[in-house]
Amino acid sequence: ILTEYTSYVDTSSAPGHYVLFWEIKGKEGTHCKELDPKIMVECCSRMEESLHYTYKIYRKRNIIAALEIRVVKQGSFEALMDYYVSKGTSLSQYKKPSCIKSEEALKILDSGVIGKYFSPKSPL
């Protein structure tokens, strides 16, 4: 079950690509210990297929690289919230960012990564 998510634009290589950070829990509310790589790669493909036609054209022309999903361990988004609260965000006003832009926030999420998966082919 997907419990938390956010995104990031990774421009550390050319072409850049979109990264989705996912926090997942098991059916009984427990931490997902094992992720099936085939299922996660299929998730990447399905996500790309659902994106706008312009994105698909950019992927086909290699202007944007393959979508990546980084699965993080449970508690990673709580650590992200703690970071923003420590920087002055009111706990009652905190809203998880839809797109990570802070290097520190990125480091927090990256430190919790337990799996990285890429879309194997262009959606067109």
Image: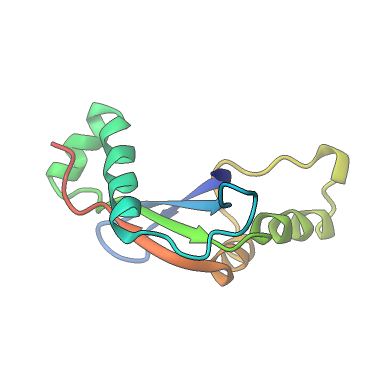
Residue at (55% x, 46% y) in the render: 5
In the displayed image of the protein, which residue is found farthest to the bottom? Answer: 111
Asked whether 54 or 3 is in front, the reply is 3
Q: How many marks?
A: 0
Q: Quadrant of the N terminus?
A: top right
Q: Position of residue 22 (x, y in %)?
A: 51, 51
Asked whether 66 or 113 is in front, the reply is 113
The image quadrant that residue 49 belongs to is top left
Q: How is the image coloured?
A: rainbow
Q: With respect to residue 98, does 26 lie above or below?
A: below
Residue at (32% x, 47% y) in the render: 44
Q: Is residue 34 left or right of residue 72?
A: left
Q: Position of residue 68 (x, y in %)?
A: 35, 55
In the displayed image of the protein, which residue is found farthest to the top? Answer: 53
Q: Position of residue 104 (x, y in %)?
A: 63, 65
Q: Is residue 58 left or right of residue 33?
A: left
Q: Position of residue 103 (x, y in %)?
A: 58, 64
Q: Is residue 7 left or right of residue 91?
A: left
Q: Quadrant of the C terminus?
A: top left
Residue at (20% x, 48% y) in the render: 63
Asked whether 120 or 66 is in front, the reply is 120
In the displayed image of the protein, which residue is found farthest to the front? Answer: 28
The image quadrant that residue 16 belongs to is bottom left
